Amino acid sequence: MYEYYVEACNVREAEGLMNQLAAEGWRVITVTPDIARGHGVVITFERQKG
């Protein structure tokens, strides 16, 4: 079973967020533009539950 986490952030914050969550066992599944924010992205993370 997997659990998912979705975060919307500024492009400048994305690298730090991805590195932080990778250290906690999350992996990036998708990165898509956040058109509503203009310069933002929506990142979906996944990790094995349990």
Image: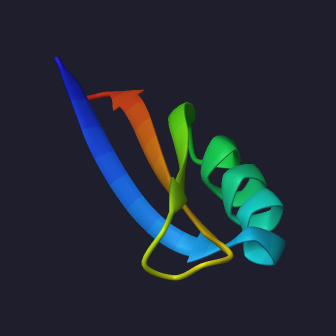
Relative vertical location of residue 22 with respect to residue 21 in this rendering, above or below:
above
Residue 9: x and y in percent read: 57, 74
- Depth order, front residue of 26/8: 8
Closer-to-camera residue (8/49) = 8
Q: Residue 49, how many percent across, how many down?
A: 25, 29
Give the residue at x 69% y 52%. 18
- Give me the residue at 45% from left, 41% from top: 45
Name above or below for residue 35 compared with residue 15.
Answer: below
* Total numbered circles: 0
User: What residue appears at the point 83 percent right and 75 percent down from the top-left corner?
Assistant: 12
Would residue 11 appear left or right of 21 to someone viewing this image?
A: right
Residue 7: image location, x then y, percent = 43, 64
Residue 21: image x %, image y %? 61, 53
User: In this rendering, is residue 4 above or below 37?
Assistant: above
**Image quarter hosting the C terminus:** top left
Q: Residue furthest left?
A: 1
Q: Is residue 45 left or right of residue 38?
A: left
Residue 15 in sight in this render: yes
Kindly indicate the quadrant of the structure image that contains residue 2: top left
In the depicted structure, whether residue 3 falls above or below residue 13: above
